[in-house]
Amino acid sequence: MPRGNSLPATLLLWLIVTLTGCSGSSSSTAPLVSPDEGAGAEQEDATRVPDSLLQLEDDPGLLAEIPEILVTVTTARVGVQVAYTRGGQADVVSADTIETQWLYMQECLGQSGTSPVVVVRDGPVTPFTAMDDVIFDIQGVPVASGSHRTVPILQIQESDFDVAQSNPGFNLRSIMGRLLWLSASLPERDYPFECARQQPG
């Protein structure tokens, strides 16, 4: 009788070891999954090129190619889409920082508008169309541009947020302010430049 009872126990032990081994083998060959499923889903969405940029590619008046977008981050509060063109740009200027600039300029100017797509350029800004609003530096080089569309598209240099500068984010605030002001059909001569000169908060 004791011998008869030991056979099922041995068989049960063998089954447990076999199944555990198979399970371990299966998981080792499967793709790694982030422990935070929410972050994984956001990352998948984040790699999508904004629709407004895709539509701009079909514009017959397009003067410059759309840059390669490595990652797009959509902010949580008002849905500003920040399209990065170089790895690590989000560490230089976060999407939250850009959203803060957008909210500040709306409040300072007393104007509201559709949350834009903001393309962060590693190098020079090249306006997309002849109708774009463009901001130049003292040497006549474009440092920011705005395409006034259903979903506005703004371009800004990564260097605009260099903390070594006297007023980081000034060019971005300037092009945001002009977008809000001109979209409301307000006279350009009345545009209050002091808003862009101030840091949010």
Image (spheres, grey):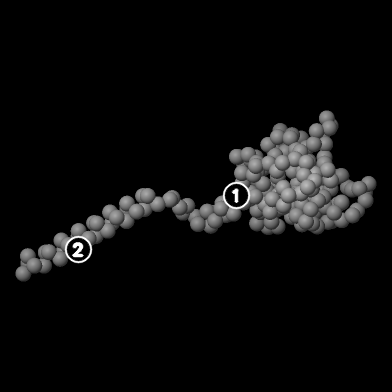
Please identify the quarter of the rendering in which residue 134 is found.
top right
For the residue labelled by badge 1, is the local secondary structure a helix, a strand or a loop?
A: loop
The dot on residue 118 is none
Q: Amino acid type of disc 1?
A: Thr
Viewer-nearest of discs 1 and 2: 1
Identity of the residue furthest to the bottom in this view: 1
Q: Earlier in the sequence, mark 1 or mark 2?
A: 2
Which residue in the protein does label 2 denote? 12
- The answer to whether 88 is drawn above or below residue 41 in the figure is above
Asked if residue 199 shows in the view, the reply is no
Residue pictured at 68% horizontal, 41% vertical = 67
* Amino acid type for the residue under numbered disc 2: Leu
Callout 2 crowding tier (Cα within 10 Å): few <14, some 14–19, many ≥20: few
Q: Position of residue 75 (x, y in %)?
A: 66, 54
The residue indicated by pointer 1 is 47
Name the residue: 80% across, 36% down.
142
The x and y percentages for residue 167 are: 77, 38
Label 2: element kind:
helix
Q: Residues within 10 Å of mark 1 (few under 14, many from 20)?
A: some
> Which residue extends farthest front?
60
